[in-house]
Amino acid sequence: MSKNTSRLRFNKYKSSPQIAKLGDYSIKVGSGKTPKGGSSVYQDDGVILIRSQNVLDGQLELKEVAFISDEINKTMSNSEVNPRDVLLNITGASIGRCAIVPNDFPPANVNQHVCIIRADENKLDPKYLMQQILSPRIQNQINSLQAGGNREGLNFQQIRAFDVLIHDYQEQVQIGDFLSTIDSRITNQSSKLDSLQELKKGVMQKIFSQEIRFKREDGREYPDWEEKTLGDIFAQIDSGMTAEQVTGPTDFPVSRIETISDDRINIDKVGYVKHFDGIERYKLMKGDILFSNINSLKFIGRAVLVENEKLYHGMNLLKLRAKDGFSSKFLIYSFNTEKMSNQFKSNAKRAVNQASISQSDIKRLTVKIPIMEEQQKIADFLSTLDSKISLESQILETLQTMKKGLLQQMFV
């Protein structure tokens, strides 16, 4: 073994970590197989069959798990998993994803796309191994093996030949436990974010179906919602400029389809044009809506609100400017409901690679809408929920960035 140094260490450990082959520290490296009969023999319960879609980075996801019978499992006894086995995806787009089998995991097997790495626990801690496989150190080795034409996947010989960093065993345990604690925080934060997003989805469904209603400050009810066409609601539904775009930046950033691909205006994804006479009439105003009318069908109807960005209206997005008496924020939330999304898509004309919806068709579409005061209450309520979601999303991103940095520093 050769010696190495890590950039980040626990203070009480002084000896340099060694570099060794994974095979020298493992008692098993092997995968399973597809049961005879394939998916036709899957059951609603029984022995879990872990497939590549169940192996995520650092955790097993069992929402779409398959089951096999005890009889079939016995024919695959060589690939039964044990608690603390490290599972590695070895084929396809998810190659390199890795998770550990929990101590309390029920009986399970793996198919041929998932490799079992059973560490020699006298020398190698499984949690430490899993974290190292997720680090750039091992991921770079996996990527280099897949470079060029060698894209069929990893074989067991290649996995055994991974150059792994070997710290003293007690330091391995401490590293594995420390990083797993961060993983738990990431999992909990992700669940918290998912719950908020589900809450928003459920609340929006109830608001826009009018199952729940807001009331006036004095407790009186608002009038019934009225059905209006989008032509009644918007003073302008316009196409953007056709000016030739140039290599930027210039003083005239323009919107493009990808500008709203993150469901917000992303200034890093704008184009640029030079000044021309009349350019100011394309300047977007706060409260304008950018609407995707030419795109793949699933993205027809995607819409975002212009806030305070300095931006001009470019090609392939429509600008929708509401009349007085209508809240653009409310309309954005309305557009994001399943009912409106389906209206946009069902009225789109489909071509080979994309779809489009015309301005005249948009103007004919209908939406139920309350008076302005209730629109604003709804928009403010949902905006508060969005702010909470954004905050929790930033916390999750911070944790993920911290974990990425730790992996890079601990496994050099």
Image: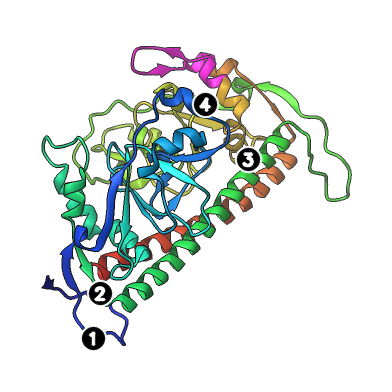
- Residue at figure coordinates x 37%, y 73% from the top left: 173
- Residue at figure coordinates x 24%, y 67% from the top left: 411
Drawn side of residue 370 relative to residue 384, left or right: right
Please name whichever residue, 22 or 92, is drawn nearer the observer in this view of the structure: 22
Q: Amino acid at mark 1?
A: Lys
Q: x%, y% of residue 202?
A: 67, 40
Q: Is residue 255 visible?
A: no
Earlier residue among tags 1 and 2: 1
Give the foreground label among 1 and 4.
Answer: 1
Question: What is the crowding at mark 4: few (fewer than 14 residues within 10 Å), some, or many (at least 20)?
Answer: some
Q: Amino acid at mark 2?
A: His
Q: Amino acid at mark 4?
A: Gln
Residue hosting label 1: 14
In the displayed structure, 38 sits above or below 377; it is: above
Drawn side of residue 215 relative to residue 313, left or right: right
The Cα atoms of the two marked residues, 4 and 3, are separated by: 29 Å
Residue hosting label 2: 167
Give the foreground label among 4 and 2.
Answer: 2
Residue hosting label 4: 236
Earlier residue among tags 3 and 1: 1
Q: x%, y% of residue 262?
A: 42, 41
Please name whichever residue, 358 or 372, is drawn nearer the observer in this view of the structure: 358
The Cα atoms of the two marked residues, 2 and 3, are separated by: 47 Å
Q: Check residue 349 for magenta coloring.
A: yes
Give the foreground label among 4 and 3.
Answer: 3
Please name whichever residue, 351 or 60, is drawn nearer the observer in this view of the structure: 60
Q: Which quadrant of the structure image shows residue 311?
A: top left
Residue stretch rendered in magenta on the structure: 343-361
Q: x%, y% of residue 384?
A: 63, 53
- Residue at figure coordinates x 51%, y 19% from the top left: 345
Residue hosting label 3: 201
